[in-house]
């Protein structure tokens, strides 16, 4: 049975400068792994085939910006993986999980587009508070709603370019 997750990435700090969360996400997608704290909730529940949505929380905006499929369970980070990590808090993490598939979307899906359709967000006054921490378990339906909206927005943007 596959699980469904939201992996949350926030702005990082490196040598006193802010690295926007979307840049951290781009690095993780390019290198096909996600760094995790040994204390991350649900760390031991991650398994091969699990579906993941990437949630970006930056100083100026928040929303979903990609998806992935896990290649296996979390494990101690390798030296090669550690080489690709830049900025805090990730530099202090000790675990990683790889992706079979990982993609970053060219646009963000803000929570405003989801709050009336995503079961996890229904009836919540402060939807963004749901996505605190680093890993959040969601239902298959929550995952499907985000993917449906992503496909719809992609089609709309393609029409606009045509």
Image (cartoon, grey):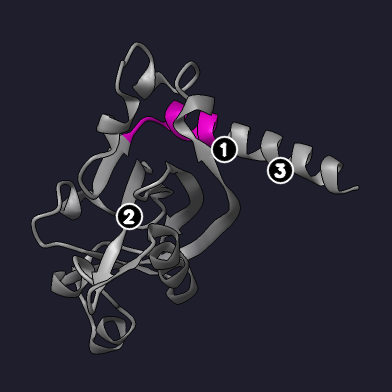
Left-right relation of 45 to 21: left
Where's residue 89, x and y in %? 19, 65
Dot 2 or dot 3, earlier in sequence: 2
Left-right relation of 152 to 146: right
- For the point 85% across and 41% down, which residue is it? 159
Q: Nearer the viewer, residue 148 or 9?
A: 9
Dot 1 or dot 3, earlier in sequence: 1
Q: Disc 3 marks which residue?
A: 154
Q: Quadrant of residue 136?
A: top left
Secondary structure of the residue carrying numbered label 3: helix
* Crowd band around label 3 with a 10 angstrom C-alpha radius: few (<14), some (14–19), many (20+): some
Q: Is residue 23 above or below residue 115?
A: below
* Residue 31: mark in rendering: none
Left-right relation of 23 to 92: right
Where's residue 158, x and y in %? 81, 46
105 is within the stretch colored magenta: no
Q: Disc 1 marks which residue?
A: 147
Where's residue 59, x and y in %? 34, 49
Secondary structure of the residue carrying numbered label 2: strand
* Crowd band around label 2 with a 10 angstrom C-alpha radius: few (<14), some (14–19), many (20+): many
Quarter in which the N terminus is drawn: top left
Q: Is residue 121 above or below residue 13?
A: above
Q: Nearer the viewer, residue 8 or 53?
A: 8
Span colored in magenta: 138-146
- For the point 40% across and 69% down, which residue is it? 28
140 is within the stretch colored magenta: yes
Secondary structure of the residue carrying numbered label 1: helix
Name the residue furthest top: 123
Q: Disc 2 marks which residue?
A: 9
Q: Quadrant of residue 131?
A: top left
Residues at marks 2 and 3, CA–CA distance in whole angstroms:
22 Å
Q: Is residue 137 above or below residue 12?
A: above
């Amino acid at each position: 049975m596959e699980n469904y997750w939201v992996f949350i990435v926030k702005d990082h700090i490196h040598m006193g400068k802010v690295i926007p969360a979307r840049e951290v996400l781009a690095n993780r997608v390019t290198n096909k792994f996600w760094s995790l704290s040994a204390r991350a909730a649900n760390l031991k529940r991650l398994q091969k085939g699990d579906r993941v949505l990437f949630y970006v929380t930056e100083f100026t905006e928040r929303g979903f910006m990609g998806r992935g499929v896990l290649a296996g369970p979390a494990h101690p980070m390798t030296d090669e993986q550690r080489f690709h990590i830049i900025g805090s808090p990730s530099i202090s993490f000790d675990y990683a999980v790889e992706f079979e598939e990982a993609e970053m979307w060219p646009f963000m899906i803000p929570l405003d587009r989801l709050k009336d359709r995503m079961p996890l967000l229904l009836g919540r006054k402060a939807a963004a508070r749901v996505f605190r921490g680093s890993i959040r378990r969601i239902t298959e339906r929550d995952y499907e709603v985000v993917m449906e909206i992503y496909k719809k927005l992609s089609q709309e943007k393609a029409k606009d370019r045509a």
